[in-house]
Image: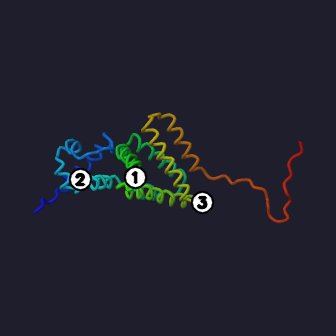
Amino acid sequence: MPRPLDHVRRADLLSGVISYIAEYGLMELSLRPLAEYLGTSSRMLIHYFGTKEAMLVAALETLRPDIGALFADVDDRETLRTRLNSAFELNTSGGAATSLRVLLQVLGAACVPDSPFRDYAVAAVRVVVTSLSEALARIDPTLDDPESAATLLVSGMRGLIQDWWITRDTDRVERATRRLIDTAVSPRRAATEPDITPGAPIPQAEPR
């Protein structure tokens, strides 16, 4: 008869898996050094999770934040600006820094054909794009394509956060982040276009 799972111990192991990946990386991860790091054995990891891939996916699921709550109450530009700036700080020097380093590795690994992390990565991208696009639509109901605007903002923020983790060039990356957020959040300026209705006079160039 198989030994029943200790769910508290299982949760501790998953937390340790995340810490291990953040410290040593996802690539070439094997059970034996991971088990030593966790103070257990490869056999016990198999007992709890079945396979290495299942263990990693279970660990990643513990990282899934409530993105809907992050943007659910956002309905004005300044609140969105503040929330986005806070997200950058949280993912570089705040409480989400460890999980963010892991997530960036997973997104890279998900690019490999038949990656076991693809479904998780797709869901992670979609949930934040959907939540942010809904917030953008509330802020500006005339925005013609909030989903593409949210995609640009999410991908830009992710790239800047990754840039910071690689280069640690705080001044440059923070300036770029402020510029990205300002561009995305500032009210759109109506473009000045010539009147092309039938019968309208054609604008003429000023004589030199």
* Amino acid at circle 2: Ala
Residue 160 position within the rendered picture, expressed as x and y whole percent measured from the top left: 48, 42
SS at mark 3? Answer: loop
The residue lying at 45 percent from left, 38 percent from top is: 164
Which of pointers 2 and 3 lies earlier in the amino acid sequence? 2
Q: Quadrant of residue 126?
A: bottom left
Q: Establish if 2 lies above or below 19.
A: below
The residue lying at 54 percent from left, 52 percent from top is: 152
Q: Are marks 2 and 1 in contact (CB under 8 Å)?
A: no
Residue beneath disc 2? 11
Q: Nearer the viewer, residue 13 or 46?
A: 46
**Quadrant location of the C terminus in the rendered image:** top right
Which of pointers 2 and 1 lies earlier in the amino acid sequence? 2
Badge count: 3
Mark closer to the observer (2, 1): 1
SS at mark 2? Answer: helix
**Quadrant location of the N terminus in the rendered image:** bottom left
* Amino acid at circle 3: Leu
Q: What's the CA distance linking mark 2 and mark 3? A: 43 Å
Q: Establish if 124 lies above or below 167.
A: below
Residue 33 position within the rendered picture, expressed as x and y whole percent measured from the top left: 22, 42
Residue 165 position within the rendered picture, expressed as x and y whole percent measured from the top left: 42, 39
SS at mark 1? Answer: loop
* Amino acid at circle 1: Ala
Neighbour class for label 2 at 10 Å: few (<14), some, many (≥20)?
some
Q: Nearer the viewer, residue 189 or 161?
A: 161
Q: Which mark is residue 143?
A: 3
Residue beneath disc 1? 110
Q: Residue furthest left?
A: 1
